[in-house]
Image (cartoon, rainbow, N blue to C red):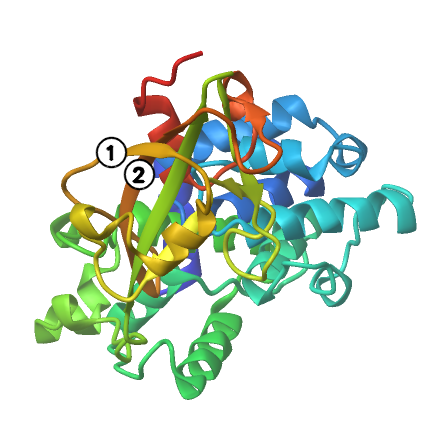
Amino acid sequence: MDFNKVLTNWYSANKRELPWRNTKNPYYIWLSEIIMQQTQIKQGLPYYESFASNYPTVFDLANAEEQAVLKLWQGLGYYSRARNLHASAKHVAKELKGVFPSAYSDIIKLKGVGDYTASAIASICFDEPTAVVDGNVYRVLSRYFGIDTPINSSKGIKEFKTLATSLIDTENPGDYNQALMEFGATQCKPKNPYCNVCPLKGSCVALQKGTIDNLPVKLKKTKVTKKHFNFLVLMSSDKKTLFEQRTSKGIWLNLYQFPLIETEQELPSEDFKTHPEISSYFKDIKFEYSLYNSKVLVHKLSHQHLYTKFWIIEVDKLPMQGIPISELKSYPTPILIGNFIEEFSFPI
């Protein structure tokens, strides 16, 4: 069976209509690929449309303030993608005079661009026969060829890249790559794939052996750590609060949050005032407090779970310079903080 021809024929009849499939402009393809990393189409599509509308050219994105870019990205997670997107836009606009690199070897040098993204852009926009390998591709290839090498091992990464490269349609690499990814996303799905109507079912090893649900194979993930976060939501009599920017390296770099106190265990309400960091923070300041969420809010990230409490602190005067509560929504925040701001009834 001509594997790539079957897929491209399937793609021409079954592909979803998406805005970035109507262009070969590398800026829009790059934008879509960065936004859609680790993101479902239905979640990422509104973000793509917002970025394309607010920043229609790489120059517009390059000239934007980082805070505005992060605000527009808010809710997508993995905020380093947004920071890298902005940094690369500046590089293309200023160093490359707005001309997007046209070869895989140059595209991959952009900050935040890896093998998959560089391969996608090079093949779709410039017809370079570079094979893409993402989660969808791993799934299709591992099932069709019956490969049980762990996809997140160094051996697996090399093996699947080599296989994908050997299969690429050199005459039409862009459509083939998109066909393979689309096939994995909508046909050869992680759960309940449509095997009964699959155009590859006659030669799929996993289907023949009954191992569809066992492939692809992944090594066990890194152990998830558990953290206890206590956010101090201060409100002064003149309707101001404290909001601080995270400057330490991490997933929330440059985003804003309420003052944070991390504890080894969950902090009970009766121990709040006597906790050393709390008593030190509010030294010589009278305050009234209440717990907003009686049940701990669990915010799950890839390698850590945040057990979160929001403490409402009423004071006559803030211990340091604050911002008007009415301005909170203008700051870029982690979705955890953003959701709280939306839900809580601040006195504005």
Residue 290 has which mark?
A: 1
Q: Is residue 21 left or right of residue 182?
A: right
Residue found at the far left of this picture: 210
Is disc 1 placed on a helix, strand or loop? strand
The amino acid beneath tag 2 is Trp
Residue found at the far front of this picture: 284
Q: Is residue 29 left or right of residue 284?
A: right
Q: Is residue 122 above or below residue 235?
A: below
Label located before the other in sequence (2 or 1):
1
Q: Residue at x 34, y 31 (%)?
A: 340
Quadrant of the frame with the N terminus: bottom left
The amino acid beneath tag 1 is Ser
Residue found at the far bottom of this picture: 155
Q: Is residue 136 visible?
A: no
Residue 190, position in %: x, y? 22, 57
Q: Is residue 186 visible?
A: yes
Whether pointer 2 and pointer 1 mark residues with C-beta atoms closer than 8 Å, the reply is yes
Residue 311 has which mark?
A: 2
Q: Is residue 46 left or right of residue 128?
A: left
Q: Between 173 and 99, which is closer to the camera in this rendering? A: 99
